């Protein structure tokens, strides 16, 4: 049987109604400005003598709808068993099913995203207003990710941009009632990222059997919980005397 693959972000987003234009699930957004922009770009490319590339279909949808699809897909990936434990041919996405936010344990590395972060014991105080972790890439591809706390995020829920070296893998979302950090319009949120020389990018590189100081196993990250360094993340037993 074929190996399980996740539906695209576009498919997830299209499964949601659009709160911006009112488009029903399964129908494209009524976004004339986005369409006009794509047409202008295609025209400029043709004028340059090149063949235009079909744009990412996700870019045809309104941002709120695209973000709903990203969060939905992240929850499905987080609740699924580890890749090696999945049954070939079995679906693990929840598309077409009634939405559920119940905790369903699948194994020791599974990330569980609860509806209410107050349900989690031993929360980190500075993260207590988190309600969700959004993974923008499939965490199956990462033994570890780097975790950074951004005390100056400009919103509670909008996607965080990573402006440093490397690329973003995920970010946290805060409750709508989360207070600012003492400065108007500034909030404390987390962002997860990797560098070009991390194990996911260079399996035989510097961190083949170690990990950077800010590394955490993404499967242990939950809203309000910083996550931890597992043997999977470290690349060998944590009690290895050669570590």
Image: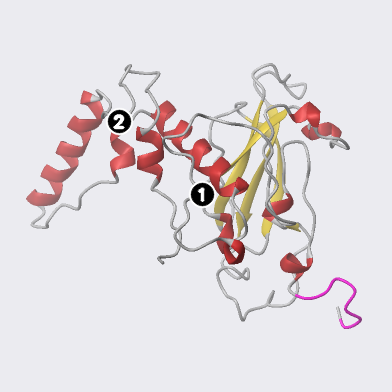
Up-down relation of residue 84 to residue 179 (above or below): below
Q: Quadrant of the C terminus?
A: bottom right
Q: Position of residue 141 (x, y in %)?
A: 56, 63
Q: Secondary structure at mark 1?
A: loop
Up-down relation of residue 25 to residue 148 (above or below): above
Q: Does 66 appear in magenta?
A: no
Between 79 and 41, the one lying in front of the other is 79
Label 1, residues with CA under 10 Å away: few <14, some 14-19, many ≥20: some
Whichever of labels 1 and 2 marks the residue nearer the N terminus, that label is 2
Q: Which residue is mark 1?
A: 92
**Residue at (64% x, 18% y) in the render:** 176
Q: How many marks?
A: 2
Between 233 and 114, the one lying in front of the other is 114
**Residue at (84% x, 36% y) in the render:** 123
Q: Position of residue 148 (x, y in %)?
A: 71, 47
Between 36 and 169, the one lying in front of the other is 169
For the residues marked 1 and 2, what is the alpha-carbon distance in whole angstroms?
Answer: 20 Å
Q: Position of residue 172 (x, y in %)?
A: 64, 37
Q: Position of residue 23 (x, y in %)?
A: 30, 21
Between 103 and 183, the one lying in front of the other is 103
Residue contact at pointers 1 and 2, CB within 8 angstroms:
no
- State the extent of the magenta-drawn residues as a range: 236-242
**Residue at (12% x, 56% y) in the render:** 51
Q: Secondary structure at mark 2?
A: loop
Lateral position of residue 52 relative to residue 79, left or right:
left
The overriding secondary structure of the stretch rendered in magenta is loop
**Residue at (48% x, 55% y) in the render:** 90
Q: Quadrant of the N terminus?
A: bottom left
Q: Does 240 appear in magenta?
A: yes
Q: Which residue is mark 2?
A: 26
């Amino acid at each position: 049987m074929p190996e399980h693959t996740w539906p695209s972000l576009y498919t997830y987003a299209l499964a949601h109604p659009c709160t911006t234009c009112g488009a029903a699930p399964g129908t494209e957004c009524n976004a004339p400005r986005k369409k006009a922009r794509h047409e202008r770009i295609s025209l400029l490319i043709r004028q340059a003598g090149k063949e235009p590339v079909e744009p990412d279909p996700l870019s045809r949808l309104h941002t709120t709808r695209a973000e709903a699809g990203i969060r939905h897909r992240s929850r499905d990936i987080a609740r699924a068993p580890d890749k090696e434990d999945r049954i070939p041919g079995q679906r693990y996405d929840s598309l077409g099913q009634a939405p559920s936010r119940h905790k369903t344990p699948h194994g020791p590395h599974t990330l569980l995203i609860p509806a209410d972060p107050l349900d989690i014991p031993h929360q980190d105080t500075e993260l207590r207003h988190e309600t969700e972790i959004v993974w923008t890439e499939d965490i199956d591809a990462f033994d570890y990710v780097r975790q950074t706390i951004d005390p100056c995020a400009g919103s509670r829920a909008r996607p965080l941009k990573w402006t440093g070296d490397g690329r973003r893998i995920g970010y946290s979302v805060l409750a709508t009632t989360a207070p600012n950090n003492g400065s108007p319009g500034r909030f404390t949120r987390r962002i997860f990222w990797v560098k070009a020389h991390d194990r996911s990018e260079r399996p035989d590189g510097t961190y083949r059997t170690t990990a950077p100081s800010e590394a955490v196993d993404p499967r242990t990250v939950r809203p309000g919980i910083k996550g931890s360094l597992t043997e999977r993340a470290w690349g060998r037993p944590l009690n290895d005397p050669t570590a």
